[in-house]
Each structure stands twice: as C-alpha cells, then as structure tokens.
Image: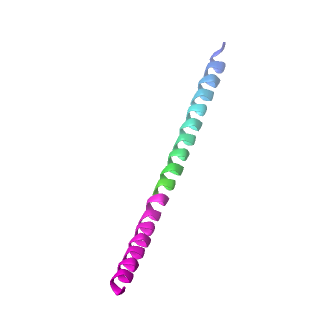
Amino acid sequence: MGIKDQFQDKAEQLRDKAQDATRGAKDEASQRASQAKERAQKPSERERQESQQQHQDEMDFDA
C-alpha cells in the first residue's frame, strides 16, 4: 500500500466521519424543532382548557 492509498483511505474515513456528524446534527435539529413545536402548541391547549373551564364556571354560576 503506497502513501497515496493511505492518504485516500484517510480522506475517505474523514469524509465518512463528517457525513455522519452532519446527519447527526440534522437529526438533532429536527428533533429540537419538533419539541419546540410541541411546546408552542401546549400553551394553546392550556388556554383552550382554561377558557372551557371559565365558560363552565360561568354556566354553573348562572344556573
């Protein structure tokens, strides 16, 4: 195995490692985006529940 082959092998290893790191970063970013979206939706659900509870309380008070 010549020096050229050794450099090519090392270059391929580094390329593969970089591609794996890129994929990992993209996956992590996707997961974080999904989590942020879920967190953003939760207050809306809570507000909706509070509104329903307030409406129910008003109906109970009027009755």
Identify whether 58 is placed above or below 6: below
> What kind of secondary structure does the magenta stretch mostly adopt?
helix
Task: State the residue lying farthest toward the top.
Answer: 1
Identify whether 22 is placed above or below 59: above
The residues colored magenta run: 37-63
Residue at x 54% of width, y 51% of height: 30
Q: How many marks?
A: 0
Of residues 57 and 18, the one nearer the viewer is 57
Of residues 17 and 47, the one nearer the viewer is 47
Confirm whether the magenta stretch covers residue 50: yes
In the rendered view, does 38 fall on the left or right side of 20? left
Residue at x 39% of width, y 77% of height: 56
Residue at x 48% of width, y 58% of height: 38
Of residues 16 and 9, the one nearer the viewer is 16
Pinpoint residue 15: horizontal percent, then vertical percent.
Answer: 60, 33
Question: Where, quadrant-wise, is the N terminus in this rendering?
Answer: top right
Confirm whether the magenta stretch covers residue 43: yes
Identify whether 13 is placed above or below 53: above
Pinpoint residue 28: horizontal percent, then vertical percent.
Answer: 50, 46
- The part of the image, by quadrant, that contains residue 14 is top right
- The part of the image, by quadrant, that contains residue 45 is bottom left
Which coloring applies here?
A: rainbow
Residue at x 40% of width, y 80% of height: 55
Of residues 29 and 35, the one nearer the viewer is 35
Task: State the residue lying farthest toward the left.
Answer: 61
Question: Where, quadrant-wise, is the C terminus in this rendering?
Answer: bottom left
- The part of the image, by quadrant, that contains residue 6 is top right
Pinpoint residue 58: horizontal percent, then vertical percent.
Answer: 36, 82
Task: State the residue lying farthest toward the front.
Answer: 63
Identify whether 62 is placed above or below 15: below
Pinpoint residue 36: horizontal percent, then vertical percent.
Answer: 46, 57
